[in-house]
Amino acid sequence: MSEPFGHFTHALLRALPPPGDPRAAALGEPPPDPPPDPAKARRQLGVLGGVLRQRLGLQVLELPPARGGLRALLLEELVVVQGGTALLTRPGPPRRDELGGLREVLEQLQLRVLSVTDEGAALDGGDVLFTGREFFVGLSPWTNLRGAEAVADAFRDFPVSTVPVGGGGRLKGFLSMAGPQTIAHGSSAGARRALQAMEQLSDHPYWRLALPDDPAGNCLFCRPGGLPGGVLLHRGGDEFPHSQRAFQKLPGVSLVPLALSEAAKVGGALSSCCVLLRARPGGRGLP
């Protein structure tokens, strides 16, 4: 019997290096304007970790700092997890050194860990949306058709469809699951086109929650203990006040607003700053 949608036991986060540590420097990328505030980023990440532990009851495993500054926080780029399977993606050379440590943690949690071995494949976990019934893979600057084929090969129990993503973003940069059959999405032309393509490709009906702001479309739904209802982590009213009001339309869901302004400056989103998963019995995690 499959687990209820949104039922997780663990969350993976990446620790930030201490101030002055050489690993805090960005790798081969121009700094964003305005630059992120490391101290503020640390506070925001701490709040996220506290919510995952205390509100959602998850065991939070903090991976050691890695090179690349705030970009190293974006674990979702490196892995796609569903059920008992984790698929390590094929990131650019600056981040490939992170895959070995991530594999070790996932294997300690008793997951079946696969890797994208096709050298012609490009895959970013931020382009992969699992709805509970099927996968949608965004075709973007970070993910190509051969990357989508790797997802289909790893998760053969579910249909996998590809969706063009315009504007240089990732699929989950403007839409995500806000509940078992609910897609929260931004209102830009690109977001509407992607959602329309998804509806044409799917045999399953989904309820839409339209949001004025594209970045607010990235949220995290969790059902603590697998119980009815659920908790939705989303970007808060200080950042997106109009979308905050739209989230209040969701019935039976507890809303937890969070700030993510600093990670967002390097392309981060709520789903990219943590990896939620359900460990198999006997999984140990970090020592």
Image (cartoon, rainbow, N blue to C red):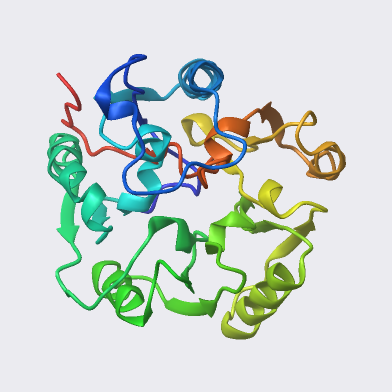
Q: Residue at x 61, y 38 (%)?
A: 228
Query: With 60 as the anchor, is 105 left or right in this view?
Result: left
Which residue lies at the image location 21% right of the left edge and 56% below the top edge?
Answer: 93
Q: Is residue 122 above or below residue 287?
A: below
Identity of the residue drawn at 17% across and 75% down: 118
Judge left or right: residue 114 versus residue 139.
Answer: left
Q: To which quarter of the image does residue 175 belong?
A: bottom right
The percent position of residue 134, horizontal first and vertical second, equals 47, 69
Q: Is residue 174 visible?
A: yes
Along the line of sight, the residue nearer the viewer: 279 or 45:
45
In the displayed structure image, the side of residue 81 where residue 223 appears, left or right: right
Residue most toward the bottom?
Answer: 200
Q: What residue appears at the point 20 percent right and 27 percent down from the top-left corner?
A: 285
Residue 265 in the figure: left or right of residue 136:
right
Above-or-below relation of 43 to 141: above
Q: How many marks?
A: 0
Can residue 55 be seen here?
no
Q: x and y percent of residue 5 in the render?
A: 50, 49
Task: Point out residue 218 in the picture as x, y percentages from the top left corner.
Answer: 61, 49
x and y percentages locating residue 206 in the rendered image: 68, 66
Is residue 53 placed above or below 76 in the rendered structure?
A: above
Quadrant in which the C terminus is drawn: top left
Q: Nearer the viewer, residue 53 or 66?
A: 66
Q: Considering only vertical position in the picture, is 25 above or below 30?
A: above
Corner quadrant of residue 264: top right
